[in-house]
Image: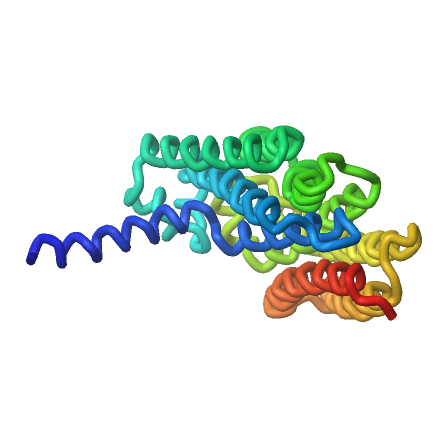
Amino acid sequence: MHTLSFSFPLLFKRIRQYWALTKPRVTQLAVFCAVIGMFLATPTLPDLKTVLAATVGIWLLAAAAFAMNCLIEREIDARMARTARRPMVQGEITVLSTLIFSFVIGGMGMGLLFYWVNPLTMWLTFATFVGYAVIYTMLLKPATPQNIVIGGLSGAMPPALGWAAIANEVPMQAWLLVLIIFVWTPPHFWALAMYRRDDYVKSGLPMLPITHGLSFTQFHVFLYTIVLSATTLLPYAVHMSGMIYLVSAIFLNAGFLWYAWQIYRRYSDILARKTFTYSIVYLSLLFAALLADHYIAI
């Protein structure tokens, strides 16, 4: 009895450690965007069994990719205050255990998508896994300050994955959603990189605020936010959405542009942190507005 009571806390601790490997907050946002893609792919409600299977499958592969990211970047993470408490940095989970964990949940995700959804979704999700875990993490991130721009495509793919899960195709409308996230990623991430610049100096990664300075990055955050604001109007321009989305996008863009302008004119770490937080809320509400517009007629 004493042994059992002692083992349960250890079990829960181990579960929390593996859960942390999957970067759950980032995974949740990615899966949310994928689910929106599923519901936008059909004029009626999609088959809920397919939605459930696709959601779990995409989550498993995304979690596997983030676990591989933690493995590959464990030495970099050890130099940064923001990531120094991650399980691999603390030595709580071994390299072999992380590899096995990533391959097992990734394999489960691929099997689920192949047999319960469709092969197209499986291959697209697997390509996204390779794009993030290998091309972005191993090749682009340590090589160029434009890493987040070039590698942003893998992080922008969830709406296309969700769309493919329901429609078994990826039409122009799905790629518009991918484009929105692709353009959103640089100002979102650079806001973080600016107020965490001391961490990134220690990491040795060539992040834009380090290689080109704050002023250059501030201008590019503002520039990309302008481009983002124009890009988010495309769903309305191609008659993919209506007034609910248009009004929501205008108000959300006004908020993002205000933050980006303030960063450009009078930067502070507090302002950059607020901008980073707003960018997450912004994307969530923007995609929620797309969903509301899709099902509510004015």
Position of the N terminus by quadrant: bottom left
Q: Position of residue 4 (x, y in %)?
A: 12, 54
Q: Position of residue 268 (x, y in %)?
A: 64, 67
Q: Position of residue 286 (x, y in %)?
A: 74, 61
Q: In which quarter of the view is residue 282 placed?
A: bottom right
Q: In which quarter of the view is residue 259 placed?
A: bottom right
Camera-nearest residue between 56 and 211: 56
Quick check: 85 left or right of 47? left
Residue drawn at point x = 65 percent, y = 69 percent: 271
Residue drawn at point x = 79 percent, y = 59 percent: 294
Q: Is residue 42 visible?
A: yes
Q: Position of residue 226 (x, y in %)?
A: 83, 57
Camera-nearest residue between 205 and 17: 17
> Please, is residue 27 above or below residue 95 in the view?
below
Quick check: 217 left or right of 57? right
Camera-nearest residue between 118 and 61: 118
